[in-house]
Structures are given as C-alpha cells and as structure tokens.
Amino acid sequence: MVGRRLDITLDRSAAEPLYLQLSRAIERAIATGELADGDRLENELSLTDRLGVSRPTARQAIQELVNKGLLVRKRGVGTQVIRSKFSRDERLSSLYDDLVEAGKTPTTRLLDFRVGPVPDAIAQRVSLPADEPYLQLRRLRLADDLPLAVLANYLPARIELDPADLEQHGLYPCLRRAGVTLKLAHQRVGARLADEEEAKLLGAIPPLACLTADRLAYDDSGRLVEYGRHIYHAARYSIRSSLAV
C-alpha cells in the first residue's frame, strides 16, 4: 500500500531547501489533523515520483520528522504518524547553567572549533546534508576544576558563534545571543566505556565508565540547530531526564 497522499506544492525558486519544504508540509498536515495518529504516510518512492524530487530529498524530509518524534518507521508497515497528545514550549538548559545552579564553578576548554562537512557516520545517523558546511565544536567541561564531560556539537554554519564566548558560557545562551530561538530537543541517553583519548581528557585511566547523551535541538521554525554527542564521567555526573527549566 502507498499510504496517505497529501496535496503538496514545492517552490523550486525558493531559497528554502526542497527537503525542508516537504518536511514542513507534512508537519503542517500532522498539526492540523489532516494526518492523524496512526495514519500511514506515502512512501519515499511514491513521493519522489509524484513530486519530482530525488530519493535522498524525500528520505531526508521524512527523517527530519522521525527525529522530531512525529513519524516512526515500522518494518513491514511503513512510516506512521505518532502525533503527540499535546505540545508545550520548553526552554532548554545547558550543562554549564546546570552546574552554576548546583553551586559549582564550571570552566570550559575549547578543543576544536572549525567549519566543514559533517563526518559520514554523523550525517547518516541524523540525516544531515553531507554537502553542507557545519560548525563543529568540541569542548571539555570541568566542574570545580574536575573534568566532567567531553561535549561534541554540530551546528549549521549559518549560525555564527564566538569561540571566546563558548569558553565563558554554555552553548544554549550563546545560541540565544546569536538570534536562535530554541524550541525543543530530543535526547537519547546511554552508557559506554571511554576510549583512551576521552579517558585522558577526563583525567582517568581506562577502563572508564561513562554516560552518553545524543541530543537533537530545533528552533521555533522547526529547523535543526544542533546535534550534540556528549560523554560524561559517570562517577561525577548523573543525567536527568527532564529538559525543561
């Protein structure tokens, strides 16, 4: 079965990428109830044939909504809507701000700050355009002079950040000062052993148990503004499930 077809018009003369136009059209259909919880979406092949877009464009549009938690891919079933029962605005906090609130003194060492293509493994994992430039950050966060976390972040290069600012403040306050209005984030928490370089940065000798967090953050227009891959010294930090403050 092909799934539910939507009346979608794409503007090829617009500056907005086709995948984002398609993603927003589907998201509007979910928000208005045109696509209800459990509805099956038209598959990628049908979308490409009907709208005249490439298969990667259709796949990226769908993946954007999978990342937002609005669609889910099911083997043998296809792509289905999993519309939230309600939505609310959330103000996201950074680790830096959390440490200050807890009465600790955070400091940051900027390990990497460069613009370039996203590594293939990252681009495939979160469906980022492999040919677009991204700002790649890597920071070591300390609390009361004890190494706590290694923070890697990937942001669209259109967002201009000051390296010196990132050493004095958390990423999210820096984004807000750059004009980004953060809307929501999805986070996946896990655990693994640190590699030798990570253990050295965290002031430990392997094997070192660490908590991990992969986070996708979006602005108020639904655009991805940050993908973070963070690793925390498990003996010095616990991850809370709540993102709102």
Image (cartoon, grey):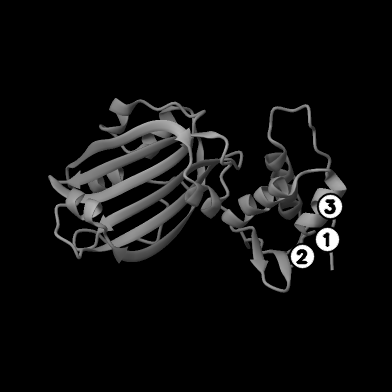
Distance from label 3 to label 1 (Cα)? Answer: 7 Å
Q: Which residue is mark 3?
A: 6
Residue at position x 83%, y 43% in the image: 52
Quadrant of the image containing the N terminus: bottom right
Could you tell me if the residues under marks 2 and 1 are in contact, i.e. CB atoms within 8 Å?
A: yes
Residue type, label 2: Arg
Please give the count of numbered marks on the rendered protein: 3
**In the image, what residue occupies the spot 57% across and 40% down?**
220
SS class of the residue under badge 1? loop
Is residue 16 placed above or below 151 in the rendered structure?
above
Front-lying residue, 77 or 124? 124
Quarter of image, res 153: top left
Q: Earlier in the sequence, mark 2 or mark 1?
A: 1
Q: Is residue 102 visible?
A: no
* Number of other residues with Cα within 10 Å of mark 1, as a class: few under 14, some 14 to 19, many 20 or more: few
Percent position (x, y) of residue 139? Answer: 29, 41
Residue tagged 2: 40
Q: Position of residue 11 (x, y in %)?
A: 80, 33
Place of residue 20 in the rendered image (x, y in percent of width and height, measured from the top left): 68, 41
